[in-house]
Amino acid sequence: MDGDYNSQVVDEFIAYLKSEKGASQYTVRNYSQAMNRCMEFFNRSISGQDWAWDSQNRDQFRSYIRQISKEGLSGSAIRLQISSLKTFYKFLMSQNSFGMTL
């Protein structure tokens, strides 16, 4: 999968938060920033290779959390990152998006 696909899936997630979940503008902003930060990390760490959200594993996410911890994010900011990823993956599961083009 390419970066455009990964971005498209995140855009659909953000639209879902707005329209179906009724998330506040602050939640939408924070989750959008968190997802973009995570995408940037995977783009850097898996450079030169295509990746998709459904191909990431526990070790890759742990590596991401370690990296943002090293960057000095507060505990609450790290919990926000984790929460946004959990919500994102619940969204993907509810949409049956794993292994499928949306």
Image (tube, grey):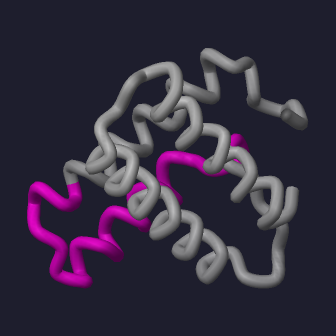
Residue 74, by quadrant, is bottom left
> Quick one: which residue is furthest to the left in this view?
75
Asked if residue 18 lies left or right of residue 1, the reply is: left
Q: What residue do we see at 87% from left, 56% from top?
A: 1
Above or below for 50 versus 15: below
Q: How many marks?
A: 0
**Vertical comparison of 65 with 87: above or below:** below
Horizontal relation, residue 21 to residue 90: left or right: left
Q: Is 55 contained in the magenta span?
A: yes
- What residue lies at 87% left-to-right and 31% top-to-bottom? 100
Classify residue 32 as left or right of residue 39. left
Looking at the image, residue 86 lies above or below residue 31: above
Query: Could you say where residue 26 lies in the image, as x and y percent from the top left?
Result: 27, 50
Which residue appears at 75% of the width and 30% of the height? Answer: 98
Give the x, y percent position of residue 49: 82, 74
> Range of the magenta residues?
54-78
- Indicate whether 41 appears above or below 21: below
